Amino acid sequence: MSLELLACRLDRNDEVPNVELAEKLCGSMNKKGIREIVLGLKSNDQAVANDCSKVLHVIGQRKPTLIAEYADDFLAALSSKNNRIVWGSMQALACITPWAPDTIYRRLPEVLAAYEKGSVITIDHSISVFAHLCNANDDYRTRIFPILLAHLAKCRAKEIPQHAERIAICIDPENKKAFVKALESRLHELSETQKRRVTKLMKMI
């Protein structure tokens, strides 16, 4: 059973067993084992749930198509009282949005709610979710791109470089001007290092 290979079940305090389990599940394309890990997100044992979240994030990074079908499970987990599960689920969603955009868009209010009240990590990855949704189709972009521009206008200055880089994946000739304008309006708030990073990004697009 996959759960028996989690770090907490092996009395380990590090993430190595979880990463190894994720790689094993990816390598064997073990759908039954992956489903077991997804169900583990709902475990009353917080250590088990947390470890399962880590395993799924690693799978999402390695082979996102293996967990794309569980978009609804990750979306449901955004309302968890366990913050580790919330940001872990948003990480997974950021990995799979290109493969499950319609499912995620249908439940956009839940993603927005998690973004609005989430931790730094939750917010970071929600920006990636929004950017990937913008790439899915024009209707999604029409609704979501203004959210990204509003975010750039209000987020902490130190977050601008990273978040701008996450948003850059959905920039095209039609929205480039608005994106650059949003960044230029915040340049005076940035450190020299941050400013160079943002300026480099603007030149690249």
Image: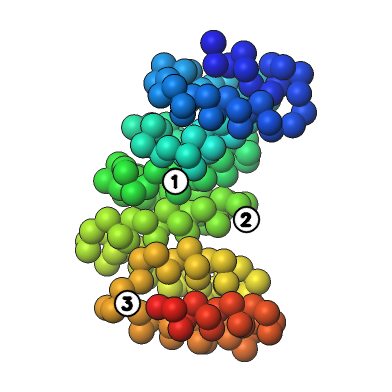
Residue at 22% from the left image edge and 63% from the top image edge: 138
In the displayed orientation, state which residue is furthest to the left: 138
Q: Which mark's residue is nearer the viewer, 3 or 1? A: 1
Q: Amino acid at mark 1?
A: Cys
Q: Which mark's residue is nearer the viewer, 2 or 3? A: 3
| Residue nearest the observer in this picture, 104 or 13 | 13
The picture quadrant where one finds residue 74 is: top left
Whichever of labels 2 and 1 marks the residue nearer the N terminus, that label is 1
Residue at 35% from the left image edge and 79% from the top image edge: 176
User: Looking at the image, is 135 positioned above or below residue 172?
Assistant: above
Taking the image as shown, residue 20 lies to the left or right of residue 78, namely right
Residue 195 image offset from top left, x and y in percent: 61, 82
Q: Amino acid at mark 2?
A: Val
Whichever of labels 3 and 1 marks the residue nearer the N terminus, that label is 1
Residue 169 visible in the shown view? yes
Q: Are the residues tagged 2 and 1 within 8 Å (C-beta)?
A: no
Residue wearing tag 1: 95
Residue 182 image offset from top left, x and y in percent: 46, 81
| Residue nearest the observer in this picture, 177 or 110 | 177
Distance Cα–Cα, label 3 vs label 1 = 23 Å
> Label 3 neighbourhood size at 10 Å, few (<14), some (14-19), many (20+)?
few
> Label 1 neighbourhood size at 10 Å, few (<14), some (14-19), many (20+)?
many
Numbered tag placed on residue 44 in the rendering:
none
Q: Which mark's residue is nearer the viewer, 2 or 1? A: 1
Residue at 49% from the left image edge and 24% from the top image edge: 25
Q: Quadrant of the N terminus?
A: top right
Residue wearing tag 2: 120
Taking the image as shown, residue 95 lies to the left or right of residue 44, namely left
Numbered tag placed on residue 175 in the rendering:
3
Distance Cα–Cα, label 2 vs label 3 = 26 Å
